[in-house]
Image: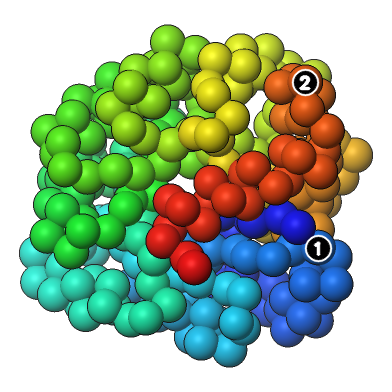
Amino acid sequence: MYFDTHAHYDAEQFDADRDRVLSALPAAGVELAVDPGCDLTSSRAALALAERYPFLYAAVGYHPENCAPYREEDLDQIRDMARHPKCVAIGEIGLDYYWAENPPRALQQRVFRDQLALAAELALPVIVHDREAHGDSLAAVKEFPAVRGVFHCFSGSAEMAKELVGLGWMISFTGVLTYKNARKALEAAAAVPLDRLMIETDSPYMAPVPCRGQRNDSRNLVYICEKLAELKGVSPGECARITLENGKRFFHIV
């Protein structure tokens, strides 16, 4: 059984067949999944889906690419949503310096720190998006030593992964592990102990080989798990079991 720790089922790419896809997941071996919000609207949508599907949970927050409309009073709405019984984290939050048209870096950093502070207040873990912002992302999380989280779709170095593990954080990998140019991701995954790893699809994006270029969903976790198991020298079944237990422990799902 698998745990997809990061899948955006509220995304418009699932509008045509969302219920069909979600209803098919348990029979495909997907025991649990988390849908992280990217702004107030998608956070509400993620919670609404989590209410309908027992195996689905939600996270709430402002994604760095979506934080331009952020106002400090929005934290009150995120706080209220975070108290929902199916909310297991603050996320997807972080920094994204990849696109020139993204919100200004100073705003991204303020929104990130505000949400890290909220996570500390609520004693919730965080789901961090870090794209081309490794130094600033690491510096920000170090300012909140009481907060624990996961760097999702990890794209940093093996050294950064080891530093995060030393701080008590988790590392999560997507279908990128299966790509031909995945040397950096594979090196990072190799450096992280199995008990600190999680797997995710980041659906509808990042489909693994052999589905690359198609819309992704949690049924493709099998390919990510197989690659990680090969890297770690364990069976796919053992890898699935360990990453499932890691995710349940991290998100406090009994």
Where is residue 33 shown, x and y percent of the image? 60, 64
Say which quadrant the N terminus sits in. bottom right
Q: Quick check: 28 above or below 236? A: below
Please indicate whether residue 124 sits to the left or right of residue 89 in the image.
Answer: left
Residue at the image position 73 percent from the left and 45 percent from the top: 240
Residue at the image position 24 percent from the left and 71 percent from the top: 78
Where is residue 237 shown, x and y percent of the image? 81, 43
Marks 2 & 1, CB-CB < 8 Å contact: no
Residue toward you, 68 or 49: 49
Residue at the image position 44 percent from the left and 21 percent from the top: 161
Please indicate whether residue 14 sits to the left or right of residue 7 in the image.
Answer: right
Q: Give the label on residue 172, or none.
A: none
Pointer 1 residue? 29
Q: Give the label on residue 233, or none.
A: 2
Q: Tag count in the figure?
A: 2
> For mark 2, does the 10 Å Cα neighbourhood hold few (<14), some (14 to 19), or many (20 or more) residues?
few
Question: What's the amino acid at mark 2?
Answer: Gly
Where is residue 80 shown, x and y percent of the image? 21, 80
Residue at the image position 43 percent from the left and 77 percent from the top: 86
Secondary structure type for disc 1? loop
Q: Quick check: 146 above or below 139? A: below
Please indicate whether residue 193 sits to the left or right of residue 143 in the image.
Answer: right
Question: What's the amino acid at mark 1?
Answer: Gly
Where is residue 34 shown, x and y percent of the image? 53, 63
Q: Quick check: 104 above or below 249? A: above
> For mark 1, does the 10 Å Cα neighbourhood hold few (<14), some (14 to 19), or many (20 or more) residues?
some
Q: CA distance from mark 2 to mark 1?
A: 22 Å
State the image quarter where residue 138 is shown: top left
**Lower sequence index among marks 2 and 1:** 1
Mark whose residue sits in front, 2 or 1: 2
